[in-house]
Every structure is written in C-alpha cells, then in structure tokens.
Amino acid sequence: MITWMQHHRKYLVVTIWVSTIAFIGAGFVGWGQYSYGDKASAVASVGDVSITADELQKTYSSLFNQYNELFQGKLDEKQAQQFGLQRQALKMLTDQALILNLAESYKLTVSDEELFNLIKSQEAFAKSGSFDKEMYANVLRKNNLTIKEYEAAMRKELLIQKTLYLFAPVARTLESDAIASAMGVADKIEYKLLTPDMVTISHDEAGIKAYWEKHHNEFKKEAVYELSLIRKSSTTPTPDDVMEKEALRLYIDFKKGKLPSTQPIEKLSITASTSPFPSELFKEITALSEEKKFLKPRKLGNDYVIVKMDTFHPATNKTYAEAKAEANAGYINEMKKSKLQELAQNSYKTFTGTVSDFIIHTQSAKLGGLSASESSEFVNKLFATKQKQGFLTLKSGNVILYNVLEQKLLEDTMVAEENTAMKLKGNLLNQKLMKMLESKYPIKIYAEGI
C-alpha cells in the first residue's frame, strides 16, 4: 500500500473526523426527526467498525455548533437540514471508520500513556495551569459525557491521527510541496520601492467631475436629527431613584403635551459627527421614528435626559460643488495608483535598485526602505510568484520592483517541516486511497432518511 501511495501524488483534503474536544462546552444539539432506540444501536457499519446512533448524534451536534458559530448563533434545524448536516456527520464517521479499519490492518494501537498525555494537555481540564482530575470529571459531567465515553472517543481520535501520521511523508498536496520547495530556497534580489508620492498629477477639472459622476453615491451629506430635549437635574443632593421617578413623570407629561410652561426645552440639530451624546445613546436616538418619537429618561452624567425626535433629514448625495474637494482627493489617489502601475510596468526590466542579502520565506527579512509589515508582505508575495523579474503591489499602495539575482538551496531542505501538509490542510489523505478503502471495507447504512 505504501508503494501504491508513492505512485499516486494527486491529493485532496478529506475531513475524516470531528474532534470530541470540540464538543466540550459547545452544548448538545440533537434532531428529533431521527430516532434509533438504544444509543448503542448501529446506524451504519464500515468493515468491522460499527457506527452507533450516539456517535452520530454527537458528531452532528459538534458540526451544528461549528456552523452555528459561523451564523452568529442563528442557525436553525431547517437550515441544518438544507445544508445536509446529518449526511455530513455520517460521512465523517464513515471516513473515520475506514481509517480505523486501516489502523487495525496495521495493528496500530494507542497506549494508556499516550492517551493520558493528550488529556493532560487539554486546557478545558486545567486548573491553575495544570491538569485537575476533579475539573476533568466535572467538565465531562456538565457535557453529558462519562469518563469512559470520552476516553474511548479520544483513544479513537489518537489512533486516527497516528494512522495519518504514518502516511504523512507521502500524503502531501502539490501545493504543500510547492511551499516546502519555496521554504527550502533562499533568494538574493535587487529591489526598488515606488511610492505614490513619486507621481505628479496635474489638475484636471473634467477628470475630477468624471470621477464624481462615477462615485457620486459615495459622497453623502450626513443625516440630520432635529431634537427636543428635557433635562432633569438637581441643584441639591437627591437620591438617584427619586430623580428617575421625577424624570419619568416629566416623560409622561412630555408625551401627553402637558409640560408646565416653565419647563425648559432644548432644541438640538445633530449629526453623527456633531453628536454630543455617548455612542449608545446616539444609537437609541437614531432608532426613533414617527411612530416612536420619544425616548424614555436616560442617565447622562448627573442628569436624566428625555429626547423627542422632531424631524429626521436622511442622508443625501452632495452636489458636485459640495463634494469637489473630496472628489479631487479621490481622483488624485486613483490616478496615482494607475500612473504608479504604469511606471512599474515600464521600468521593472531596466531599474537599478538595492541588492539584498539572501532571504528565505520562513524568516522575517527587514528590507531597507520598507516597514516591517511591508517587508513581510513583500517576501510572502515574492515566494508565491513564479516570475523571476517583475513588480508587486502592496496593501499600502506602494509598489516594489524586483529581480531575483541568485538562488540557493538551504542546507536543511526540510525547512517546511515533516508535517507541513498536516498543518496547512489538516488531515490529508489520497482520494484514490479512500476509494480503495471503500472497496475493501464495505459501507452499510442502516438509518433511513439521512
């Protein structure tokens, strides 16, 4: 099998298990649509490995929680069904079972010491930085897991990892091979930094107006909120609860139009940039409408304030005259970028610049004239390109001309580390190998409707 794998080097990412660790603290999510009776009953079998309803429920729960996090807690069961999470959970478990069959064929096992070392390393069970048995038991109990169940699941996951690690030297993706090669090479380059300041743009009224017409929806006048405001304050020490009650009475009178004529009412006209209120209060004010004009008393410093929305003027587009200064700045910025690209295109083959020392992808190189972040960004892009000579544009808008003068292999050609592929892509396994395992270990599904 090793020989077979060495001759088939097109690889695909295959997710083969959902970590039991991810289930800890995430909460249990089940689905009522499927019921299998005893939790140990088999919903599927793969070769000599059975998949129980309990395993399927836990895997589904972990997968649901991962999706739910992406949906900011708004994923519901209907969406989960649309995404086919039940099918995904079962597929993960059948892929896992294929690897477990493979592990058994190689007589691979996980020792008690290996299992304990893994459990000790998990932060969920640590107290004051060290593994705590009582914490271990309590966390599992709160997550509806017994120690026996959890350790059986972790032993299984360790066995899967050990099996994958056995094939790690050959189970490498083409892209990780490319990265490994790049990381094992050092480049000496000549480079030159080009900045927008090197480009001069002449005033062009027609160009500015054309820019404004293209981007006119981006130039807005701020929305204006015209307000009436009442303050409830006291010149003498007054308990806060008394102040609040008095403010509430004012609020009711204000709504009913029964304020005493002696009550001062402030008139304000504010925008987002001129608001004198804290951000949270301003947010509440902007939520007022014709249907809900009044805001109940809110504490502001030592006072209580009651706000009424009189008139709301929504944001509107600026005229050309109003937006001209902003449009001019935008036009100049756009033209400088364009001219800088043109300058780079015309000069990258003939430029004279600074010669660097040998630089490698895995180490931070501080290149003269560039900030640390620009150096890092440039080196990452340099080692990702196949061009010996050219130019690269940075996020800052600066452009770097480069010419690779010399390359050399590093003495340690394994700079990328043996498990680069595992770190970059997780659990990598050959697609053809998986198909071969499927033909060797029959998959039988007993659950209907998944």
Image (spheres, rainbow, N blue to C red):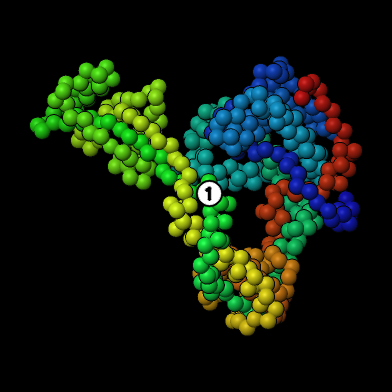
At a point 9% along the width and 31% down the height, the residue shown is 236
Q: At which x and y percent is residue 85?
A: 70, 30
On the rendered structure, is 85 left or right of 44? left
At a point 48% along the width and 35% down the height, the residue shown is 134
At a point 56% along the width and 51% down the height, the residue shown is 213
Q: Nearer the viewer, residue 373 or 418?
A: 373
Quadrant position of the C terminus in the picture? top right
Judge whether 205 appears above or below 81 on screen: below
Judge whether 428 appears above or below 298 on screen: below
Question: Which residue does the numbered mark 1 point to in the structure image?
Answer: 216
Q: At which x and y percent is residue 409?
A: 72, 75
Crowding at dot 1, Cα within 10 Å, few <14 / some 14-19 / many 20+, comes out as some
Q: Nearer the viewer, residue 325 or 343?
A: 325
Judge whether 3 appears above or below 389 on screen: above
At a point 40% along the width and 22% down the height, the residue shown is 291
Q: At which x and y percent is residue 403?
A: 68, 77
The image quarter in which residue 420 lies: bottom right
The image quarter in which residue 378 lies: bottom right
Which residue of the protein is positioned furthest toward the left in this rendering?
236
SS at mark 1 in the image: helix
Residue type (three-letter) at the residue carrying disc 1: His
On the rendered structure, is 323 left or right of 335? left
Judge whether 142 appears above or below 280 on screen: above
Q: Which of 210 and 262 is in front in this view?
A: 210
Say if residue 328 shows up in the picture. Answer: yes
The image quarter in which residue 17 lies: top right
Say if residue 104 shows up in the picture. Answer: no
